[in-house]
Image (spheres, grey):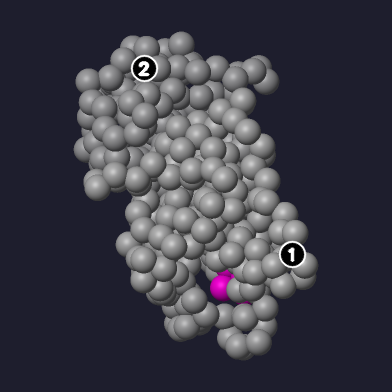
Amino acid sequence: MPPPLSDSPAIRPAIPANGPDSLADSFATSYAGVMAFIAVAVEGNFAKAGDRLGIGRSAVSRSVQKLEDQLGIRLFVRTTRSTSLTAEGQRFYDECHPGVGRIIRALDDMRDLREGPPSGQLRVCATVGFGRKVVAPLLHGFRQAYPNISVELLLDDGPTDFTTDRVDVSFRNGRMEDSRVIAKKVIPMPMMLCASPAYVARHGLPDSVEAIAGHHGVNFLFASGRVYEWEFKVGGQLRKVTPPAMLTFNDADLVLQSVLDGHGIAQMAGYQVCDHLRAGSLVACLPQYAPDDRGHYLCFLSREHLPARMRVFIDYMTDGIRAQDMQISSSATALGMTGRVPDTTFLRPTG
């Protein structure tokens, strides 16, 4: 969609001059037109917008046409194959959409209060690894507790577009620097450098950040094409390392499996490796330099007028995630500070 033009004319609906009846008619036309306009902009065509609004394609087209006539501005470029916003249409969308969203959330909130138990659909997004291992297993219990709420879970390591993708709640990892969303920290996210006992027996462990360059790394590739840089906190300062690697994956589970198989070392999130560290199938390395400013977050657009279905989902998932034992025990990381090759008795889980 084209960006809004800085010199585009101001968008002001014509003020009716024929008294209160004309004003009421004008308001009705504007409201129906704006709702139809938003639906077409989000869905990308008039037919899907009609399905979303529960009306016919022709009714959507008429509402948009009346709005365009009222504004005196063309909002869409229509062809037989596509529908796209004009520059003025993009500007109008940017101005209208937040307000319409607040109205819809307020109506949903009132409906939830009137109709009793939370109900409706939730569209949830999570990173692939965390979504698969942590979020998805909790959904079954949530559905049992709230059978009138349906959940659609999308796994994606890319950034979340709440508006375009119509996402209600997103699970994000790392550092939250987007001030446009509400980010609730659920648990810390320790990043641990790990190797398998078999790898340690053959190659040992690095005893410093500089020594990592002499080891076989297994790297993670982001959806953007950027390779994840390992991070360490040394002397209070953040240091980033991109190790030499013969294996690179765009899937966190494949990185983990490669390390378990003894092909190299990798820096991975605590939720991925905590069970393996306790079982002794992985050994942590240089834990004293692990960064401590990352977290797992529940993100959403606004605290205002949260529908009951979102409130109960956020509370349920927060409690469920915090109840899981994803902490890195001191005994599992002690070996990484010594540089010793592990033996099987040390790696056997305690208790």
Q: Answer with left or right where residue 239 lies relative to residue 83.
A: right
Q: Answer with left or right where residue 118 lies relative to residue 198.
A: right
Marks 2/1: CA–CA distance = 74 Å
Residue at 63%, 33% in the rendered image: 9
Picture quadrant where residue 176 is located: top right
In this rendering, the answer to whether 240 lies above or below 69 is above
Picture quadrant where residue 189 is located: top right
Q: Secondary structure at mark 1?
A: loop
Badge 1 local density, few (<14 within 10 Å), some, or many (20+)? few
Does the rendering let one see residue 253?
no
Which span of residues is magenta-colored? 306-310
Q: Magenta residues: mostly which secondary structure? A: helix
Residue that carries the numbered disc 2 in the rendered image: 243
Residue that carries the numbered disc 1 in the rendered image: 18
Task: Give residue 200's position: percent from left, percent from top.
Answer: 31, 28
Mark sitting earlier along the chain (2/1) = 1
Residue at 36%, 58% in the rendered image: 46
Quarter of the image for the N terminus: give it.
top left
The question of residue 309 being in magenta is answered with yes
Task: Give residue 56's position: percent from left, percent from top.
Answer: 36, 71
